[in-house]
Image (spheres, grey):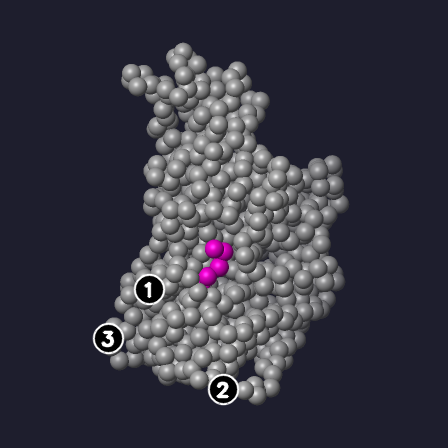
Amino acid sequence: MTENAEHTGVDRRRFLAFLVAAPTLTVAVQLDTPGTAAAVPLPEPPDLGDVLNLAALPTSHLLTLKVAEDGTVDFWLPRAEVGQGLTTAVAMLVAEELDTALDTVRVHLDKARPELLFNQLTGSSNSIRSLYRPVRTAAAAARQRLAWAAALRWGTEQAQVTTRDGRAFLADGRSVAYGELAREASTDRSAEQPLALKPRAEHRLIGSPTSRIDARALVTGRQQYTLDLDIPGAKPAMVRRPPTIRGSVRRVRNATAVEAMPGVLAVTAIPTGVAVVAETFGQALAGKEALDVEWGPGPVDELSDDSLRAKLRGAVAQGLPPLLGRYVDAEFDFAPVSHAPLETNCAVADVRAARATVWAPAQSPIAARKAVADAIGLPDALVDFHVVQAGGSFGRRLFHDAAIEAAQVSKAVRRPVRLMWSRIDDMRHGRMRPPTHHKLRAVHAGGALLSFRHRMASVAMDVRHGFGDAITAGLTGLPLVGETTAQAMFALSVRSPYDMGATRQTLTEVPLKLHTGSWRSVFSGTGRAAEEMFVDEIAERLGQDPVAFRRARLRTAAQRAVLDKAAAGWGRELPDGWAQGVAFHEEYRSRTACVVDLDATDPKAPRVMRAVIAVDAGRAVNPRGIEAQMLGGLTDAIATTLRAGLHFDKGLPLEGSYSQFHYARQRNSPNEAKVHVLDGGPDAEPGGIGELGVPAPVAAIANAYARATGRRPRSFPVDSSIDFEPFPR
């Protein structure tokens, strides 16, 4: 069945749908490959999401949808649900095209499948972008098969059958439920008819604000996460970790004594520390705390905040002043930031002599499966890796250290284990957004901008997960390949949306062996935020209003529409000590603007009182989900701009809890926050949203602080003085 597609713009992908041998209706989709390469040009210029979507295209056919005899619909999703609401958006796509109720659709997270080359990575805001048509094709094919089965039952033409609410209808009033047709529809006794996706005008779910399908399970505690799984015989395990990052185990002095403690079943050393397996997590925790370990040094044992900042600042130079024109210079520093998801790092593993099974939240399950197999010395084919819904991620689940550790411990103690990281370990030994330093310069003459230059220095970003598959994960483990990958990610994600003359942005990575990883975005979270702060400085130097300056230099009407919507209340009167701040960001074929009102009456305790965000993400599948993503980005921006950041001392972050990390609390939230989701137009395809929401609010808050206090912040978080007693190492 071929798609008689609605308008696709530059996206001319065509998919086939076909039956899968099964007792009830099961369909899959397949790319119509002839001529595909010529038919799918990359947009000019492409972004990181475009590249990943194109790479995933050859395996986009590996989707499966099943209609059961009770009318329920099962769909296997080759992505991870980490709290972003993806399963809800996908369920909406299925229900829309299948003409059934949303509550009949069940979305399952697919396990690691190496045949899904480049197509099982949850990242770069590409999930809905890449799945939008394939998922709808599978559902539309199922709808057509059910209509065909109804026509066959009634002895009429398929064109006489309509569908809605999970039933097939004839004009004379006869109807039949999908479940009753599932077996008949699974047979192949008729020539296929052309397959047409619903036109936008007929959408009843897509584009409608919809609550999450897992909301009740989440708030009642019924949602199952990794450590909720009932895996027979799996015993709790925790790991004692070194007092510095990447330290090593030399010897355990009291392993026998710890093994004799109540409930302790085993003590075993693994490359990242010493594991204790026990009957309960309390006993495992007590055992690991009682361990007496001689530790070897790590590669950054002497690293402190001052030395880290000095290395970054020394990695890039501002350059000599220009010979022609006047110039504006600025520098910014951003502290490292913990991902700090509510669910700490965890995994369940059952390693046998000739087979292993692992359960864990994972954004790159193919790479995770490969890494686990390598760590325990089994062929990849003998490892089953099951993806479990995560209790938060922000990029943390791109890394699979807990799964590797659980497998190593299970192999060593010869029993299934349920491994959990403590909160302290998750913050100190987990992943972090790398610290960065930024040098920016703009040259102007006669009120016109001649050039814009941004030099960004960052601790090397760990991209060893590759693009989610075993091939690129293996390649990016090589230093030069990893550096090239990071440079490509920077070039495809950090771009100025403005016409500011000759523009150049460069990345220099400092090769420190910290546990780094992308946090809410790859490089734009600090890169574009720094640029938007600098734009305010340029506007001030040229004597122009920040909003008017941006509007005059944005390149498209869609960009200006977003800015205009967010800035509708710009310039309104505010109390003394308050000010407004504005910023704009565009990435992944989406764009957003943010305006905040900041109370800095006490400069040491500023608070965002009001925030207005406008966002154009193309075709909005679930506007309520987009709103939630943008509010989450706002909260992250409030936290990391004003208070939250990691502090290094002798090779280890000092922060070991939420209280020490100073993430935003309810009292830090604005009294008023409004998100306007703009319509991307009748021909729009979905844009990316997961990584869009942080850069603009970060810069808007910093710009408001500068306007309110008369002092431009150069180092973030603004309040970097942390008064607390750190946990012992």
The residue singled out by tag 3 in the image is 573
36 vs 163: above or below: below
Label 1 to label 3: alpha-carbon separation: 18 Å
Residue at the (51%, 74%) spot, across then down: 501
Q: Is residue 321 left or right of residue 166?
A: right
Of the pair 47 and 22, the residue shown nearer to us: 47
Q: Picture coordinates of residue 703 (x, y %)?
A: 39, 75
The residue singled out by tag 2 in the image is 326
Circle 3 residues within 10 Å: few <14, some 14–19, many ≥20: few
Of marks 1 and 3, the one in the foreground: 1
Q: Picture coordinates of residue 141 (x, y %)?
A: 48, 29
Which numbered disc flags the more N-terminal residue, 3 or 2? 2
Which numbered disc flags the more N-terminal residue, 1 or 2? 2
**Region in magenta:** 585-589
Circle 1 residues within 10 Å: few <14, some 14–19, many ≥20: some
Of marks 3 and 2, the one in the foreground: 2
Main secondary-structure element of the magenta-colored stretch: strand
Which numbered disc flags the more N-terminal residue, 1 or 3? 1
Residue at the (53%, 65%) spot, across then down: 494
Circle 2: residue type: Arg
Label 1 to label 2: alpha-carbon separation: 30 Å
The residue singled out by tag 1 in the image is 564
Circle 2 residues within 10 Å: few <14, some 14–19, many ≥20: some
For mark 2, give the secondary structure.
strand
